[in-house]
Image (cartoon, rainbow, N blue to C red):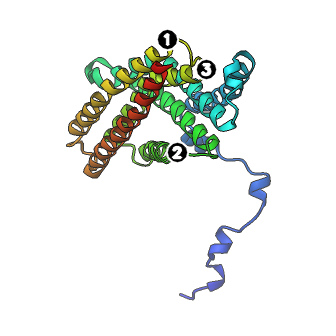
């Protein structure tokens, strides 16, 4: 049988390059639905990021107009640092109760008591709160470029990248450990309240008490953080979808994060001593 080479299509015959699809064509609805199966989740995540971006200038305006001590800080570096302490104190305090509720539902309620939709809703709520706190970290990294502290830069960068790993490797151990690490950031709220008080109410008798309370809560919750992550790694070790290096990585990072956090407590202790001496 004679072969007609002219009828054999080439790659360029099958997929001609054209600008028309960019200008005129629309994606099939089924393709869009597969990409954004739960568009409501993305709406909420975007809404959280927008709200946090508005909170920063709003809090700055309030501090600048209501507190002379904030205006007298002088350098923009000190104002930016105090602004971040203020926003972190507000957001972490707001997040603590709902985050605790959903974390306990996800980690401590058995599957026999939860249906698929309930579990999905709880996990999405945890992720939304994680996105809010990671957004706060990103804003802090972007705005504190004048005099960046190496420890803060390293800690926040590693935390953000670790959170991103949970999207690349969405296994049980990654999701549980990453969400646990972010959850325990909420217990830093007391620390940030104390640091805010130190700058805005330096002569108040309550300032050293707030600083000390923040130090106690922060220090007590660090061992619990390590134990919680260790339990999640141990419980997920034989998971068929789990890769063991992920569990090892997460535990090593947890120990590293905890060490950096406890080291930062020495700074808070020195601030507390200065505040008491006033």
Residue located beneath label 1 in the image? 206
Q: Residue placed at 21% from the left, 42% from the top?
A: 237
Up-down relation of residue 46 to residue 114 (above or below): below
> Under tag 2, what secondary structure?
loop
Q: Earlier in the sequence, mark 2 or mark 3?
A: 2
Q: What is the distance, in whole Å, between disc 2 and disc 3 at their CAs?
A: 21 Å
Neighbor class of circle 1 (other Cα within 10 Å; few <14, some 14-19, many 20+) is some
Q: Nearer the viewer, mark 2 or mark 3?
A: 3
Per the rendering, the mark at residue 196 is: none
Please provide percent x and percent y for residue 220.
Answer: 30, 24
Q: Nearer the viewer, mark 1 or mark 2?
A: 1
Please provide percent x and percent y for residue 180.
Answer: 36, 32
Per the rendering, the mark at residue 200 is: 3
Q: Residue placed at 52% from the left, 18% from the top?
A: 94
Per the rendering, the mark at residue 149 is: 2
Please provide percent x and percent y for residue 48.
Answer: 60, 28
Q: Residue placed at 49% from the left, 11% from the top?
A: 206
> Under tag 3, what secondary structure?
helix
Q: What is the distance, in whole Å, between disc 1 and disc 2 at their CAs?
A: 28 Å
């Amino acid at each position: 049988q004679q072969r007609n080479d002219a009828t054999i299509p080439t790659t360029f015959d099958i997929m001609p390059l054209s600008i028309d699809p960019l200008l005129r064509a629309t994606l099939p609805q089924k393709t869009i639905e597969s990409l954004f199966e739960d568009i409501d989740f993305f709406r909420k995540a975007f809404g959280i990021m927008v709200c946090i971006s508005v909170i920063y200038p709003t809090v700055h305006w309030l501090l600048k107009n209501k507190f002379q001590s904030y205006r007298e800080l002088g350098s923009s570096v000190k104002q930016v640092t105090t602004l971040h302490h203020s926003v972190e104190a507000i957001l972490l305090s707001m997040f603590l109760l709902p985050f605790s509720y959903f974390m306990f539902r996800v980690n401590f309620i058995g599957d026999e008591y939860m249906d698929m939709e309930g579990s999905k809703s709880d996990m999405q709520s945890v992720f939304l709160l994680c996105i809010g706190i990671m957004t706060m970290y990103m804003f802090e990294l972007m705005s504190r470029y004048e005099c960046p502290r190496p420890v803060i830069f390293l800690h926040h960068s590693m935390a953000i990248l670790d959170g991103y790993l949970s999207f690349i490797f969405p296994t049980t151990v990654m999701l549980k450990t990453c969400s646990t690490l972010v959850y325990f950031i909420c217990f830093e709220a007391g620390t940030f309240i104390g640091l805010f008080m130190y700058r805005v109410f330096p002569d108040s008798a309550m300032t050293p008490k707030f600083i000390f309370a923040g130090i106690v809560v922060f220090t007590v919750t660090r061992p619990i953080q390590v134990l919680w992550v260790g339990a999640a790694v141990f419980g997920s070790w034989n998971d068929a979808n789990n890769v063991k290096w992920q569990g090892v990585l997460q535990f090593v990072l947890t120990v590293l994060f905890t060490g950096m956090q406890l080291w930062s407590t020495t700074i808070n202790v020195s601030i507390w001593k200065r505040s008491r001496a006033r």
